[in-house]
Image (cartoon, grey):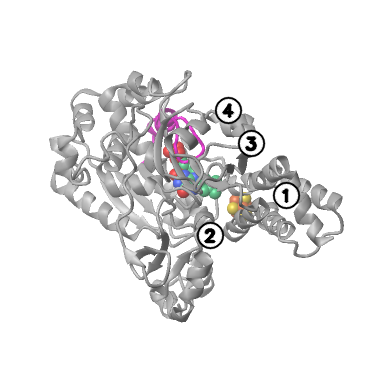
Amino acid sequence: MRTISLALKIPLAELFGTVSFYHHLSQSPPGQSAPRVCDGPVCRLRGSKQLLAELSDQNATQMPCAGRCDDFIPVLKGAEVLIGTTADNLQVCPSPLPPPNPGQTEECVFSQIRQPNRSTVLGYRQTGGYDGFIRMLDLMRPADVIHALEDSQLAGRGGASFPTGLKWKTVAEEKRGPKTIVCNADEGEPGCFKDRAIMDYDPHAVIEGMLIAAYATGANQGFIYLRYEYPETLNILAQAIEEAQMSGFLGDSILGSDFDFQIHIRRGAGSYICGEETALLNSLEGKRPFPRNRPPYPVTNGFQDLPTAVNNVETLASVPQILRNGAEWYRELGLNGHSGTKIISLSGDIQYPGNYEIPIGLPLSTLLYDWAGGATSGREVQAVTMAGVSGGFLAKKDLDVKLDNQSVTEKGSILGSGGVIVFDDSRNMVEVAANAMEFFAEESCGKCFPCRIGTQRLTERLTMNPPIPSKEVWLTEVKEIGQTMKATSACGLGSVAPLITDSLINYFPDQIEKYLDRQE
Ligand SMILES: Cc1cc2nc3c(=O)[nH]c(=O)nc-3n(C[C@H](O)[C@H](O)[C@H](O)COP(=O)(O)O)c2cc1C
Ligand code: SF4
């Protein structure tokens, strides 16, 4: 660190701040070569603690959810992800392809993903890829593209559901430049693995989406901010970008037009908060990745303080299909007046885990039972998490909720980025809640104290450390800490973390009672 600090003229303290912020930067040997075992909520169900113990002679450490929840336990070693259940059966294996859609409903993002060779330019072109972009270059003005996006009602799929057309319009209307498109491929939410599937099997759809975004907004540079835990995806994306360049889809004067656009990949180093768009921008600029105060928003003051559109992988991969098939086609994919589709990453105690592209408005129970076969080994579904773990739990009659933003919010949860983790009736929900809160406490960036201290205090309440004075005090404290966090946290991490404790109190008073009785 001293050598780097001198060579790059960065104060040692600042460098220390960076090195200690990210999971995968190590201050002592063996560093990268030591195995890191996923300790996310789904891998815990599968015995990750045991695997960690088995690998202890190799100095193994744990890492937060590595986004392979539809597979065996992932272990990151050097530049490879191995998967397995014991130290002896770990092996390199491609990530699973999304299962065929069992619901017979029309798909958007996944409609071509299972075609062979879809990840090459040739395979992509043979299945209609880049058609929308070529047509756009020939026939559409940037304003027409934005109008089509607004008409489709596409909203961000990264969690906040902000209308994509409006975001692009604001960037397009800004006079300052150069403008930037950022593809948010950080996917750090436990239980979410949809962006990985899109990038692994359909990388050109992401590139085409970024090209269309750039044309519409007037941007000429793009970044894909990719989470560290996806090393194979890094290679796939790098190859796809190179192929796109060689085929004339990226670079200067694209396909003979006066439109220039280049894409660069930037790799995260292991930090959940870097998925928050302003923390991501700080990380991209080499700064400490604290979320920025807003306003101003990235659309006017983003990368290097210039207009920037930050979009999720799934959002961008939806765009070429919308341009190809039309806004009305996309709108009508949803049910009950909702527009479009959403990919749900389904994992945990469920017969058929995987990524499912559902029409927005599909009942959760249809997905759980009709599409994914219900709970494993003859058990009942006790609860699910929503939005990875950020939406807290849904249980009992609320498992019937329709999967659209409004319906899920009415149940006190959020649809967010679409991770759903299933817990069967043998699971201790207080333990599950404690693990989720521990994750938030670990990943809180520490910038504002309601979140920094609130997540710690809630973890303590869920692990009986320190002992609590009485049940009444426990309940009052947990509710008050949650309310304060929701009202005063500076970003989404601190304001959603209490949904875990709120929903635990709502659905599982009996399990809380039992947990508190153990102490008294
Ligand atoms: C704590 C936190 C983590 C987030 N992580 C991600 C992420 O991993 N990927 C993502 O696309 N959006 C993530 N978001 C949402 C982004 O801030 C932003 O809304 C999104 O990238 C915008 O793209 P979209 O409009 O296409 O959804 C996160 C937000 C918060 C508060
Ligand atoms: S809410 Fe948490 S993660 Fe967000 S800025 Fe505050 S401390 Fe950081």
**Is 164 inside the magenta-drawn segment?**
yes
Q: Which residue is mark 4?
A: 407
Residue mark closest to the camera, 1 vs 4: 1
Task: Give the residue drawn at x 65%, y 56%.
Answer: 431
- Numbered mark located on residue 396 in the image: 3
Q: Which residue is mark 1?
A: 511
* Circle 2/circle 1 CB separation < 8 Å: no
Q: Which residue is mark 2?
A: 44
Q: Which label's residue is closer to the chain start, 2 or 1? A: 2
Amino acid marked by disc 4: Ser
Judged from the image, the secondary structure of the residue bearing numbered disc 1 is helix
Residue mark closest to the camera, 3 vs 4: 3
Residue 482 placement (x, y as % from top left) = 72, 46
Q: CA distance from mark 2 to mark 3?
A: 23 Å
Label 2 residue near ligand 1, CB within 8 Å:
no
Amino acid marked by disc 2: Arg
Q: CA distance from mark 2 to mark 1?
A: 20 Å
Q: Which label's residue is closer to the chain start, 2 or 3? A: 2
Label 4 residue near ligand 1, CB within 8 Å:
no
- Say few, some or many: other residues with alpha carbon within 10 Å of mark 2 (under 14 / 14 to 19 / 20 or more): some
The segment highlighted magenta reads 155-177
Q: Which label's residue is closer to the chain start, 3 or 4? A: 3
Front in this rendered view, residue 430 or 196: 430
Q: CA distance from mark 1 to mark 3?
A: 14 Å
In this rendering, would 398 be left or right of 144?
right
Q: CA distance from mark 3 to mark 4?
A: 15 Å
Front in this rendered view, residue 419 or 429: 429
Residue 401 placement (x, y as % from top left) = 57, 30
